[in-house]
Image (cartoon, helix red, strand yellow):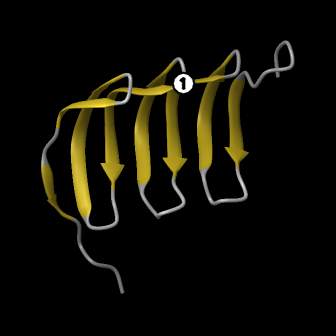
């Protein structure tokens, strides 16, 4: 914590199933991290000022996107193929 805000490596979770684990700078997700969403989707990659930014991998329930080129949460480039089903 720095100035009452997350700073450095840390974790955050909500009762609805959302979680983030990774780097924080003055309370904002910045650097490498992993977001897990209530619907089971996961994003692993770079963040800047609280937004997904740059290279990363977004894994949806039935679709795999790799790499992501994101700019303030807007998907700019995506390569998609079906993710393998799990037992």
Q: Residue furthest bottom?
A: 87
Q: Is residue 11 above or below residue 61?
A: above
The image quarter in which residue 7 lies? top right
Is disc 1 placed on a helix, strand or loop?
A: loop
Q: Is residue 57 left or right of residue 39?
A: left
Q: How far across and down, in percent of the image, does residue 60 sit?
A: 33, 59
Q: How far across and down, in percent of the image, does residue 14 sit?
A: 70, 51
Quadrant holding the N terminus: top right
Q: How far across and down, in percent of the image, does residue 58 sit?
A: 33, 47
- The residue at 23%/72% (across/down) is 84
Quadrant holding the C terminus: bottom left
Tell me if mark 1 has few (under 14), some (14-19) or many (20+) residues whose alpha carbon lies within 10 angstroms of its own: some
- The residue at 42%/43% (across/down) is 44
- The residue at 53%/17% (across/down) is 49
Q: How far across and down, in percent of the image, does residue 25 sit?
A: 65, 17
Which sits in the foreground, 75 or 48? Answer: 75
The residue that mark 1 highlights is 50
Which sits in the foreground, 15 or 36? Answer: 15
Count of picture labels: 1
Q: Is residue 21 above or below residue 72?
A: below
- The residue at 70%/36% (across/down) is 10
The image quarter in which residue 20 lies? top right
């Amino acid at each position: 914590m720095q100035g009452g805000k997350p700073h450095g490596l840390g974790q955050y979770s909500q009762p609805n199933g959302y979680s983030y684990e990774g780097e924080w700078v003055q309370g904002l997700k910045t650097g490498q991290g992993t977001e897990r969403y209530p619907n089971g989707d996961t994003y692993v990659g770079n963040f800047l000022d609280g937004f997904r930014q740059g290279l990363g991998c977004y894994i949806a329930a039935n679709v795999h996107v790799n790499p992501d080129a994101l700019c303030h949460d807007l998907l700019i480039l995506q390569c998609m193929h079906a993710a393998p089903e799990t037992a």
